[in-house]
């Protein structure tokens, strides 16, 4: 480990952290992001008028699928059994786009931050892919960890976020 970075060995080389001796505990993470777009694009999504199909359902499934395959995307992430993945897509109240939230829960030896972040990213990319024919100016924006619970570092809640549901043993933060 170099300067507290667990993914580097003593020589500074990348390595996968050995989590084999860590206890299995409840881990939950919430990530958020958005896809900014023209109001007319958002209206077409909400009204089901995108030629490729149901954007919200497809993006939700893409986010869930991506969370399950995070170790295939992120080289040093551990494959892990997930207990639950929820992906929510909601129109922004001001009509500027879609808000995306992913909540990932696992009982495992390492956290699920990357799974939640990857879920948000994949959902946003799917929205872009399905709507790019009508709006190439869309922006996938502000993908961030909002809250996490479990493991050695305990609970984290990003300041300035709205209510965050961490579920049993965590409640709303």
Image (spheres, rainbow, N blue to C red):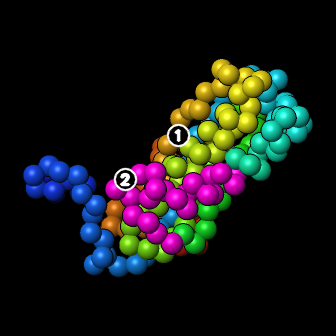
Name the quarter where the C terminus is drawn.
bottom right
On screen, residue 108 above or below 155: below
Q: Is residue 14 left or right of residue 159?
A: left
Query: Where residue 116 sits in the image (x, y, percent)?
Result: 53, 54
Residue pointed to by mark 2:
75
Residue 143 — which label? 1
Sequence-wise, the earlier of marks 2 and 1 is: 2
- Give neighbour class at mark 1: few <14, some 14-19, many 20+ (Cα, 10 Å): some
Q: Is residue 86 visible?
A: yes
Highlighted magenta segment, given as a residue range: 60-81
On screen, residue 85 above or below 141: below
Query: Where residue 107 sits in the image (x, y, percent)?
Result: 48, 75
On screen, residue 106 above or below 46: below
Q: Residue at 55% across / 62% down in the picture?
A: 68
Q: Is residue 149 magenta?
A: no
Residues 103 and 44: in front is 44
Q: Residue at 70% across / 51% down in the picture?
A: 60
């Amino acid at each position: 480990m170099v300067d507290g970075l667990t993914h580097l060995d003593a020589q500074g080389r990348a390595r996968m952290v050995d989590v084999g001796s860590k206890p299995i505990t409840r881990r939950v993470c919430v990530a958020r992001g958005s896809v900014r777009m023209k109001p007319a694009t958002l209206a077409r999504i909400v009204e089901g008028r995108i030629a490729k199909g149901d954007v919200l359902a497809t993006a939700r499934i893409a986010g869930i699928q991506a969370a399950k395959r995070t170790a295939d995307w992120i080289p040093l992430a551990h494959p892990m059994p997930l207990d639950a993945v929820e992906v929510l897509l909601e129109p922004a109240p001001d009509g500027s786009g879609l808000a995306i939230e992913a909540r990932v829960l696992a009982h495992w030896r390492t956290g699920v931050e990357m799974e939640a972040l990857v879920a948000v990213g994949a959902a946003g990319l799917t929205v872009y892919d399905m709507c790019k024919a009508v709006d190439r100016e869309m922006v996938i924006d502000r993908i961030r960890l909002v809250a996490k619970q479990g493991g050695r570092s305990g609970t984290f809640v990003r300041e300035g976020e709205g209510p965050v549901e961490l579920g049993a043993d965590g409640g709303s933060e």
